[in-house]
Amino acid sequence: AQSVTQLDSQVPVFEEAPVELRCNYSSSVSVYLFWYVQYPNQGLQLLLKYLSGSTLVKGINGFEAEFNKSQTSFHLRKPSVHISDTAEYFCAVSATGEYGNKLVFGAGTILRVKS
Amino acid sequence: ETGVTQSPTHLIKTRGQQVTLRCSSQSGHNTVSWYQQALGQGPQFIFQYYREEENGRGNFPPRFSGLQFPNYSSELNVNALELDDSALYLCASGQGRVSPLHFGNGTRLTVT
């Protein structure tokens, strides 16, 4: 079985500062990794995904994440945040043997961008 | 290309009642998954359907059941509602093993 730990429940940051949202996973099999964003009263939007290949993955809205197999981590980064990035971010994992991605999510990290 | 749409957006039910939530998958997608997101938590996998057959289930009791129709739309049914069933229910569709899921905006269910 897989599990995901998001190490920070809330991350406050000033506008234009860099940010890192941390995610660690546990799995006995190879995994796919995802980051989703959820704005208030909305569903989840995919930011980026790691399936294979390059460990540095670039996504939408200037976000990127790095897959580190030895540390079982998939931290999300952005070099300069905007007020509009305020939202909740979820890290998720699925086993590569699963058809259709039965995702296991972390508890989420609320990113608060202050002016 | 239409996205994933869910109905209704909000619903209030009384403990012990039954509820049906509906989801229209994104065009061309043949897999649909349902997730429960309690307040302040991450989504939890309920079950998944592929081509009208259940293809995996999370740790939810049998009173949570579903259907996927030939047009790949889907229903989530919950019987004997409990207060703890109050949550945002998310539907997601996809196609293939490595196709990321596309989520709808969810149905907010409140059980009183």
Image: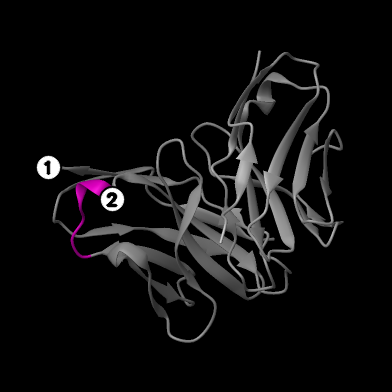
Main SS of the magenta segment? loop
Residue extending furthest toward the front:
B1
Q: Pinpoint residue A49: horizontal percent, then vertical percent.
A: 48, 70
For the record, the magenta segment spans: A79-84
Q: Is residue A64 visible?
A: yes
Residue designated by label 1: A115
Magenta run includes residue A108: no
Residue designated by label 2: A85
User: Closer to the camera, A52 or A37?
Assistant: A37
State the image quarter where residue B80 is shown.
top right
Q: Chain of mark 2?
A: A
Counting labels gives 2
Q: Is residue B59 visible?
A: no
Amino acid at pointer 1:
Ser
Q: Pinpoint residue A91: horizontal percent, then vertical percent.
A: 48, 57
Quadrant occupied by the C terminus of chain A: top left
